[in-house]
Image (tube, rainbow, N blue to C red):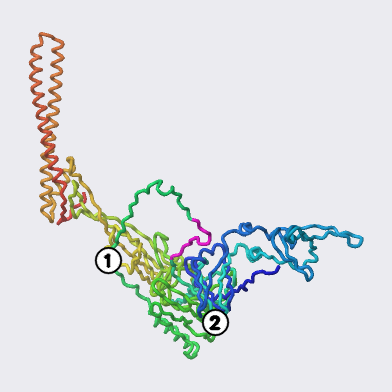
Amino acid sequence: MANEAKSPNPATIPLKRVTLYKHGIGHFERRGKFKGPGEIELLCGPEDIDDMLKSLLVLNVEGGGLAAVTYDSAKTLPARLSEFGFDLRRCHGLLELVAQIKGSPVTIKVGSTKVEGRVAGLDAVEQAVGESKIIEQQLLLYCGGASLKRYGFSAISEITLNDPHLASEVQQQLELLFQSIRKKDRKLLKVELTEAIEREVVIAYSIPNPIWKTSYRMVVDEGGRVLLQGTAIVDNVQDEDWQEVQISLVSAAPVSFIQPLYDPVQPHRRKIQPQGHNSQDPYVAERAHKFGDGFGQAEGMSSTNSFELQLQERFKASKGADDSGVQSVAAPAAAGASWRRLGPLPNQSREAEAVNVFDAAQLQNVEVEVSESGELFEYQISLPVTIPRNSSALIPIVNELIEGERISLFNSGRNPRFPYAALRLTNTTGLTLESGPVTILETNAYAGEALLDVLKKDDTRILPFALDQSVTVVVRDNFERKPFWRVRAWQGFLYLDYKEETQKTYNLENLADKDKIVYVEHPVQSTLSLVSQEKPVEVTESFYRFRIPLKPKEAHSLSVVEEGQNYQTVRLEDFDSPDMAAVKWLMDQNFVDQQFHAFLKQVIEKRTVIRLLLEQRKAMHEHVAELKSEQERARENVRTLGTSADRYKTAIDETEDKIVAGIAKLNELTGQITELRKDYIKFIGQTLQSDLLVQMATT
């Protein structure tokens, strides 16, 4: 068809840099020369489009105009095509298209003649060709007035859509159908540059990408040297190859979230009554508020400089090579600066000795530039990396001799009999080592595996990797309750404080023919304080660590003594005779504060008075009850004897007088007891305490 709108040629610019983070986001940077006018295309998956729209950055490095960035609608293809008055999906040729645009103004070209009109329909006309008949499709064209003409499609060489809107819709549908066949569900973004000049363009965005992972190998030789090799595992799940890109691996985990920006959002609006129909509800704005014993390091750890110098001298003597190939380990730069790590040892071989795994590993050079600022640590791979689409790569990031010590680590909660073989490492690489699995090799053989947590430079970790059955441990527990050492009075109670001592003894025996260093982990309990003569070399969040050197076949006992406090209570408000005996027994002790002794004395005196009155009231209550019983017997006799029971009537009256007097006495005693109780409760509510000069035996 003629008069189609001319569209710019879409293009892409190459991917140059990929930065991967530990929280599932990758930052991608494209850079390249582009001559406009034209469009730069970006394709992304439907799960990436929200992050793409949130982070997309377009820079015209050399200046010039940047038009809008356009992208596909969130509507599905069938929904978007259904908005048109015709559907090109049903058109297999010109006939189907013409059949859908009835009434449209067109210009057709028949031979050298152009005819204008409106499409009225299609006719199938039977024509004789020799002895046979064929059916020819013809266009029925309304040419104005009362004229309708038919033109055979075989004679029509061109049809021009005279309506520009219809021509534009045809072009839009063709573009939609073209995008649908490129890749299913892919979202297309177009960056339009309007000026006809060549300039350098940078496009950057952040979209989901698998986190980069780390794995390590540690080679330990008989001399105790530790070689650390680390690799980063990088996954390319994008639909394009990463060809010669700069890779940066960042250990920080910035805040990241998904906000739906791609799907159109039509907010719900409240429907209100016509103005003046209803009054508004009262509204009160909320008030804005204004918010205004370290332990020494273990012995036996060699320094980095002497450790590396000795190793370099060993290799110099073995080969006699010059020193130019030896690269010393550079000190890390200041925070925020960049520096380069090189392989520490030259490519040299031994005479009359095969190169083992340890030595071969040292011959590998690793070039990584790192930068550090605050909590962020970044590995920048110096050489460009190529990773095909849907592939992964292992990228070396560290190959260093580090400071380490071969130890055994015992934790009764992990294994009650044997410690774990472990490496105690100090990160002398100058790098931040990310968390990951570690494979340990000893004397060229597989020794075990461990997990490494994030390790900052100069920090220390212990990596258990196997069970060490050459050291046995037997644990014994003992408990002792100490005598009272303090007495406290508070809110009607006496608190008798005493101390409890727990002792855990670790009996270690080295069954091997070589020296062992055993670290014993003892649990830290917040209610107990450590009183042992042996002090731990370090303390973790949950454990004290004790360092025990053992000679071959040597046994050693480690006693860890801890002390806690407890108390026994005595209720003073209404204690009985056993409690009274305990308080009187306390009176015989020596108190630092004599005021507390006087307090106990008054407690006994006041409580004794109350107890005596209680006994009197009890006796009087029993006496009144007995009088009432006698009076009842006398009344029974009167009822039986009648008028001859005058003697019993007199006894009833006398008993009644005694009962009245007894009840009065009971009321008097009750009142006295009530007043004394109020005074006593107030008295024992005070707060006092005193240490004991001489500790008492436990009762």
- Residue 513 falls in image quadrant: bottom left
> In the rendered structure, does residue 260 fall within the stretch colored magenta?
yes
Residue displayed at 47% across by 53% down: 268
Q: What residue does disc 2 label?
A: 354
Foreground residue among 487 and 13: 13
> In the rendered structure, does residue 101 fall within the stretch colored magenta?
no
The answer to whether residue 653 is left or right of residue 157 is: left
Residue displayed at 16% across by 47% down: 685
**The residue positioned farthest toward the top in the image shown:** 643
Residue 290 x %, y % = 29, 61
- Residue 678 falls in image quadrant: top left
Mark 1 surroundings within 10 Å by alpha-carbon count, few (fewer than 14), some (14 through 19), many (20 or more): few
Q: What residue does disc 1 label?
A: 533
Foreground residue among 5 and 305: 5
Work out whether 4 lies above or below 83. below
- Residue 525 falls in image quadrant: bottom left
Q: Amino acid at mark 2?
A: Ala
